[in-house]
Amino acid sequence: MIAVSLHIAFGCVALALLFDGWRLLRGPALGDRIVALDTMVINAIALIVLIGMMGGNSTYFEAALLLAMVGFVSTIAYCKFILRGDIVE
Amino acid sequence: MSNLADAVIAGLAILGAAFVLIGSWGLVRLPSTMERLHAPTKATTLGLGALLVASVVFFQAKLGVWTAHELLISLFLFITAPISANMIAKVHLHRLRTGAVSEPDSIAGPPPRPGGDDDWATFQAPEGGTPAATANT
């Protein structure tokens, strides 16, 4: 039961990543692209968590935590750059 | 017990993946940027929270170990998601104001203006004496 549900979850998250990619390519505003990138990071974390459950291996969670931090910092840096033309003033 | 744990893990995994998918579908489907901001920041974060709870239950039921990493990840995401959503909304408002983008028709119409002569706080100069006002002096 777990294996089937994990496969369904993999499919859903992969489809969600495709939707994000469509919005990232399509735009039209710059804000849409930032939202799409931020969502892609969160979906990648979801994929890593699912891979960790599939393999029964808890080593992947460090990667998920690091990706969460890097994704947040990069989103904030991108927004700061557009707002102020500079990241660290 | 094992069957119950299996059902809980499977249910939480399906629920989380469904929320993640709904969030991204909202990102594709909603008509304007400010509305598109709603779907990923709420539905996707909630879905990932459900997946992480499923992972906690999985490692406890299958391997007999408690892992705290998932709680750390979900705490971090629940703290940072509103901050990044706020920053993205500010970027969009400023770009609307400079005329870099034009707002398409949205379901709810344009956001209401603040009362009186005030503008939104993100457009105003910082008040005197606050850290934001004295940062560059």
Image: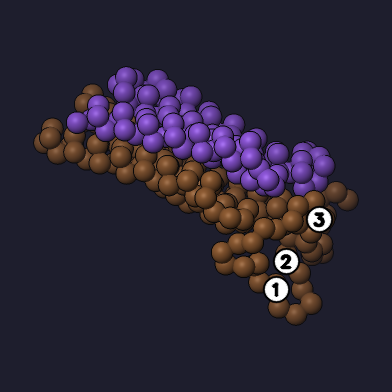
Colour in which chain A is drawn: purple
Q: What is the number of the mark on residue B120? A: 2
Quadrant of the rendered image containing residue A39: top right
Label located before the other in sequence (3 or 1): 3
The first of marks 1 and 2 along the sequence is 1
**A78 versus B97 height, above or below:** above
Foreground label between 2 and 3: 3
- Give the residue number, with chain letter if any, for mark 1: B114
- Which residue is more in the foreground, A78 or A87? A78
Q: Which label was assigned to residue B99?
A: 3
Chain with colour brown in the figure: B
Q: Is residue A23 left or right of residue B57?
A: right
B100 relative position to A34: left or right? right
> By what rule are the colours in the image chosen?
by chain
Residue at (77, 73) in percent of width and height? B118
Q: Chain of mark 3?
A: B
Mark 2 residue type = Trp
**Residue under mark 1: which chain is it in?**
B
User: How far apart in space, not on screen, are marks 1 and 2 (Cα)?
Assistant: 6 Å
Label located before the other in sequence (2 or 3): 3
